[in-house]
Image (tube, rainbow, N blue to C red):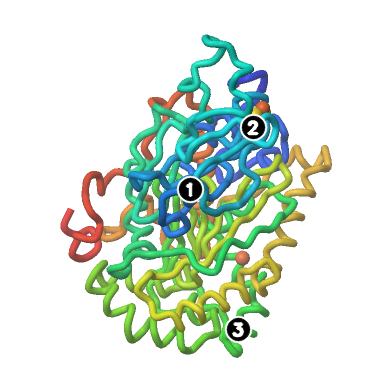
């Protein structure tokens, strides 16, 4: 039993992942949610922007780390500043725009003005302050503790004691590189930001993307057939499909070709992938990863960044209370792709995973009701089953992370909740166990010739 911040939460009663169950309270209780803000969102590395969104000095976007609003701004020296979007005078929200380019951020209330690094530069009628009333260098907008960039993705953390971003991502970098490093120019987000609200707990979506291939063959059956002209999901295959997790980040995938890309229903894109990108990717990342990219696959970086490699949807789940989540989603492509291919992919992502997209709508309703049934007091006392494939662990020689065989399994979802439990019960990062994240420590994953055999 752990007591933090007035919450009395009996963590051992909330899940037993070796037995394969999780309490429904985890998806509904306000106390648990408040603790997540403190124990998880105020401590881990969170995705805040892609470098392509803010290429020039003064470019900025606003987003949230937990429920803390932040401004993410490109500085004059090309570094990235991330600071809390709230005025240190009376707390007003300073920047109301989603993004743009600014020389100053000026608060609407009394006219305090900040530079693009969040430093207080001046205020309206500055003469009302007598000498000694304020030291401006101490009253800027509050910066985060650390900002890190991994191959175009900008992350930030509020915790000065957090491990390095590279260690935080750990072995998962090997998989993440499939979308960030498959071609020389790296990746970019295109087509603007799509924003929508779903009345669900944020974890319902995050754990779906980290490893729920199971729902795809049922929830998305009709939409998949419509997009592919009748192709059914591949048969259950325990030889060539896997789940892999490292510290709660995870990917479920096959090694069997072009599943996800076919779901976009755009022959031109499939052709580009097979004839141009795949050979390049094979050279750059090895054959194994070029197979993973094209298979049916889905992924999450703990806690709330998710994507589908071949489908190119890329999104973050912003918590807005225990039963509300704001989705921000983008299309991710390679910078080196020709414009007409980027355009085809953008349209296809809108059609499938836009707010009114075929697949997005399939999911939204299920996720909403998976949250809201737990409003029932008696319902909420029950457990949810996470036991599928519990004995299918596989120490695969070539795949990093904690690997399970078979794409239809709850393995990564169990690892997601294990990481959640680790963080919720840890006093500091020193207490957080490393769950197979550091085989790649200090290595550039691109330089590994073929899988991990060389390690
Ligand atoms: Fe921002 Fe007063 S609250 S200037
Ligand atoms: Fe889905």
Q: Which quadrant, please, contains the N terminus?
A: top right
Label 2 SS: loop
Please tell me which residue lies in front, 204 or 107: 107
> What separation in Å lies between label 2 and label 3 (alpha carbons)?
53 Å
Seen in the picture, residue 45 relative to 297 is either above or below; the reply is above
- Give the distance between the C-alpha atoms of the residues marked 3 and 1, in whole angstroms: 31 Å
The residue carrying mark 3 is 227
Q: Is residue 265 above or below residue 430?
A: below
Q: Nearer the viewer, residue 230 or 53?
A: 53
Q: Which residue is mark 2?
A: 111
In this rendered view, identify the residue nearer to me: 69 or 323: 69
- Across and down, in percent, residue 214 comes to 58, 65
The answer to whether 294 is drawn above or below residue 317 in the figure is below
Q: Position of residue 362 (x, y in %)?
A: 70, 68
Report the residue at 32% width, 68% height from top.
182
Label 1 Cα crowd, 10 Å radius (few <14 / some 14-19 / many 20+)? many
Query: At numbered mark 3, what does the secondary structure look like: helix, strand or loop?
Result: helix
* Residue hosting label 1: 47
- The residue sitting at 61% across, 79% down in the picture is 224
Secondary structure found at label 1: strand
Give the Cα separation between the discs numbered 1 and 2: 30 Å
Q: Label 2 neighbourhood size at 10 Å, few (<14), some (14-19), many (20+)? A: some
**Where on the picture, by quarter, is residue 436?**
top left
Mark 1 within 8 Å of ligand 2, using the beta carbon: no
Mark 2 CB within 8 Å of ligand 1: yes
């Amino acid at each position: 039993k752990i007591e933090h911040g007035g919450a009395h939460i009996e963590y051992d009663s909330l899940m037993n992942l070796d037995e394969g169950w999780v309490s429904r309270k985890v998806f509904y209780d306000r106390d648990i949610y408040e603790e997540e803000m403190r124990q998880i969102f105020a401590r881990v590395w969170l995705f805040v922007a892609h470098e392509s969104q803010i290429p020039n000095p003064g470019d900025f976007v606003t987003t949230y780390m937990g429920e803390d609003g932040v401004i993410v701004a490109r500085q004059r020296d090309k570094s990235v500043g991330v600071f809390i979007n709230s005025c240190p005078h009376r707390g007003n929200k300073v920047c109301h725009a989603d993004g743009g380019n600014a020389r100053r951020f000026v608060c609407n209330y009394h006219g305090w003005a900040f530079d693009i690094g969040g430093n207080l530069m001046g205020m309206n009628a500055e003469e009302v302050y007598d000498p000694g009333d304020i030291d401006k260098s101490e009253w800027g907008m509050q910066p985060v503790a650390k900002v890190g960039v991994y191959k175009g993705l900008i992350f930030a953390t509020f915790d000065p004691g957090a491990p390095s971003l590279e260690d935080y991502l750990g072995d998962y970098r090997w998989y993440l590189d499939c979308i960030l490093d498959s071609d020389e120019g790296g990746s970019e987000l295109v087509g603007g930001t799509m924003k929508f609200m779903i009345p669900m707990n944020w974890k319902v979506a995050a754990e779906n993307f980290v490893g729920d291939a199971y729902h795809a063959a049922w929830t998305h059956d009709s939409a998949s057939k419509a997009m592919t002209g009748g192709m059914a999901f591949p048969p259950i295959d325990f030889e060539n499909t896997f789940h892999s997790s490292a510290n709660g980040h995870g990917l479920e995938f096959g090694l069997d070709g072009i599943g996800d890309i076919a779901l976009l229903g755009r022959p031109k894109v499939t052709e580009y992938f097979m004839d141009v990108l795949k050979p390049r990717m094979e050279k750059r990342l090895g054959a194994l990863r070029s197979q993973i990219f094209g298979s049916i696959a889905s992924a999450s970086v703990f806690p709330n960044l998710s994507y589908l490699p071949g489908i190119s949807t890329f999104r973050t789940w912003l918590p807005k209370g225990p039963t509300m989540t704001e989705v921000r989603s983008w299309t991710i492509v390679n910078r080196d792709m020709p414009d007409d291919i980027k355009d085809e992919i953008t349209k296809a992502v809108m059609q499938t995973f836009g707010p009114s997209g075929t697949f997005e709508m399939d999911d939204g309703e299920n996720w909403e009701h998976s949250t809201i049934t737990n409003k029932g007091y008696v319902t909420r006392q029950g457990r949810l089953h996470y036991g599928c494939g519990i004995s299918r662990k596989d120490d695969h020689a070539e795949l990093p992370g904690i690997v399970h065989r078979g794409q239809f399994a709850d393995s990564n979802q169990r690892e997601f909740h294990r990481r959640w439990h680790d963080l919720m019960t840890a006093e500091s990062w020193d207490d957080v166990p490393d769950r197979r994240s550091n085989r790649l420590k200090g290595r550039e994953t691109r330089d590994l010739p073929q899988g991990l055999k060389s390690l």
